[in-house]
Amino acid sequence: MQTVRTVSFPDQQLLDDLSPLPAGLRGAVWDLETEPDGGTLAEIDGVILPYIGAGAVLGSLSKVEQLKFVQTQSTGYDGVIEAAGPAAGVANASGVHAAATAELAIGLILAKLRGIDQAVRDQQYGLWRPERRQSLADRKVLLVGVGGIGHEIARRLEPFEVTITRVGSSARTDEHGQVHASSELAALAASHDILVSVLPLNEHTHQLIGEEVLAALPDGALVVNVGRGSVVDTAALTKEVLSGRLQCAIDVVDPEPLPEDHPLWSTTNALITPHVGGNASAFQPRILKLLRKQLDALAAGKTPANLVQAGPFA
């Protein structure tokens, strides 16, 4: 039985890219800030959130009285379930960003270990300052997060001749080997050179990588975060990085964006990118493929993929 009949798109271009819609579905354009175009809030029962800045407009979901389905364009869905309410199904874009985010994680690791960030700064002044830097080869990597993005990072790390230790929410063995529990993080950190976090944000992961875990890392260790900023305690990380004991290469941070006067901006031990992990050329064709699949499922009365809250699809 078809549950959703009118879906809102955050911009006209996305609606155009996915048109014609499957039979039985109507489309409206709604950026969650102004009034919908092509439909009314009373008619809308499915919402596709914007990719950029979705968190700032989640409160508008409460205006949709007949809300039955919300689709994010991001892997993370911080606050979406709460904003949508228990009656709505919520799906994320798991898989869409995996390749691009994994690429960035590897790029951040290599750039920081090999001093590429420092070389870029030196280039501005015509400075030629060769020095011996760390290789990625032979490093011990603590990979925190074993979902789709974590798996893609692990695949890309393997050819670099590293030792990978994977950490998930609970201890288990999967098709790729051993997964340690997050409760083991501090004990594991002491023997690893690089910690990579790709965890989603929830009540269990908020500041999971805090003072205890960071203090356990050996001197000179590198902290990489391409998941969610609040998984890492920013104050604790800043203290360790400014002291010179740790390095960091981060695409996400808490708060985001990082305030202009924050000390992490000015320390050479930090490499910061502005949350661009999934925002690459691979995004567009992959999100369109997922959204077409979701719209087909909705039109056919079938369960959409990637549900993180079932709602009416239970």
Image (cartoon, grey):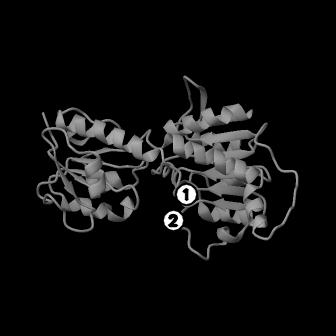
Side (left or right) of 135 relative to 225: right
The picture quadrant where one finds residue 23 is top left
> Which residue is found at the position 23% from the left and 68% from the top?
34
Neighbourhood count class around disc 2 (C-alpha, 10 Å): few under 14, some 14–19, many 20 upward:
few
The residue indicated by pointer 1 is 252
Label at residue 256: 2
> Which residue is found at the position 53% from the left and 44% from the top?
100
- The front one of 269 and 290 is 290
SS under mark 1: loop
Does residue 308 lie above or below 221 as drawn?
above
Label at residue 302: none
Q: Position of residue 39 (x, y in %)?
A: 13, 58
Does residue 52 lie above or below 163 as drawn?
below
Question: Mark 2 and 1 residues: CB-CB less than 8 Å, in contact?
Answer: yes
Distance in Å between CA atoms under marks 2 and 1 = 7 Å
Q: Position of residue 284 (x, y in %)?
A: 41, 47
SS under mark 2: loop
Whether residue 314 is visible, yes or no, is no
Q: Position of residue 87 (x, y in %)?
A: 21, 47
Q: Amino acid at mark 2?
A: Glu
Side (left or right) of 190 relative to 200: right
Q: How many marks?
A: 2
> Which residue is found at the position 68% from the left and 56% from the top?
248
